Image (cartoon, grey):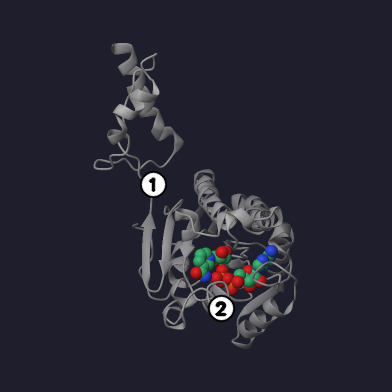
Amino acid sequence: MNNIASTENLRYDNKVVVVTGAGGGLGKAYALFFASRGASVVVNDLGGSFKGEGNSTKAADVVVDEIKKAGGKAVANYDSVENGERIIETAVKAFGTVHILINNAGILRDVAFRNMKDTDWDLIQKVHVKGSYKCTKAAWPIFRKQKYGRIINTASAAGLFGSFGQANYSAAKLGMVAFSEVLAKEGAKYNIMTNAIAPIAASRMTETVMPPEVLENLKPDWVVPLVAVLVHDSNVGESGGIYEVGAGHVAKLRWERSKGALYKTDVSLTPSAISRKWDAVNDFTNPDHPTGPADFMGLLEAAGEMSSNE
Ligand code: NAD
């Protein structure tokens, strides 16, 4: 991307950043970073357990205190992201607007699918999907009006690839990718850039499932720089991306479609016709990389031509 600034010291002076779930883990690292680079930060955190139980003002307060002691600007907000309008209202009341929204808050309710209860499913969708929606919905008219907005949505490798015991979480996290891709398209002409990250970092979410020597190299601080680049003024055009980031590795992901097979759309399109061309359906040697539903139209036209020509 040509526009991304290559300076070592990206600044965020006069920018208002809302970070959800900023009381710990990745969110805290984002909040401390942006405040240290001149931004005014809303530190949102409900302060509950990693399973989404309880609430407390302490998580957000500790981070706000740390920012203020270092000479930065921050206010706390203790609402659940399900009430995103109140979080954005906090930003507007304290700092007049919002420029950057980092949808980061999250919980886990891991359980094998066989044993999953509706409450495990619903709570995960509420916090991750509805929470990101509500915060973004409240910020969106402001972004459009000021013709400036930067959004990060937090996906996960669990969402991209599926993870045992995380059907609820994986479904929600892939939802964050689709959400980002739509916002990238709808926000383009208003200078609203939206990207999704699939981070890996040591936090209370991962400390019970990974050994200490692995966690040592997974500092949330190693996720921050990518987010910093994507939400900076200098990012004009990099939107709708999906990035894996953590432990010093940053990579972009995209969809890949096999060339596939074409069939005449008549009575010959039978299950055995599908089976006969099964290898072609699954052959990734010469793939496409579609970026929108319209990319499919060319294939439909080719299939239509084949049917009318024969
Ligand atoms: P974390 O538990 O340290 O941080 C999440 C924060 O969100 C907590 O402080 C929590 O209190 C807050 N929160 C939870 N529900 C909330 C709600 N309803 N409203 C407001 N705040 C709420 O975990 P983390 O690892 O820093 O996770 C941050 C994000 O990154 C999450 O979305 C998580 O799913 C995602 N993620 C993390 C990893 C990883 O390796 N740590 C991997 C993939 C995705």
Q: Residues within 10 Å of mark 1 (few under 14, many from 20)?
A: few
Q: How many marks overall?
A: 2
Please tell me which of labels 1 and 2 falls first in the chain: 2
Ligand 1 image position (quadrant):
bottom right
- The three-letter code of the residue at mark 2 reads Leu
Residue 111 quadrant? bottom right
Name the quadrant of the N terminus. Answer: bottom left
Residue 107 relative to residue 239: left or right? right
Judge by depth and name the residue closer to the eye, 178 or 266.
Answer: 266
SS type, badge 2: helix
Q: Is residue 27 visible?
A: no
Task: List the single residue furthest toward the bottom.
Answer: 69
> Do the numbered discs 1 and 2 sit on residues whose CB atoms are within 8 Å?
no
Residue 61 x/y as whole percent: 70, 80
Q: Is residue 285 visible?
A: yes
Q: Residues within 10 Å of mark 2 (few under 14, many from 20)?
A: many
- The three-letter code of the residue at mark 1 reads Trp
Tell me the residue that label 1 is attached to.
255
Tell me the residue that label 2 is attached to.
32
Residue 21 relative to residue 93: left or right? left
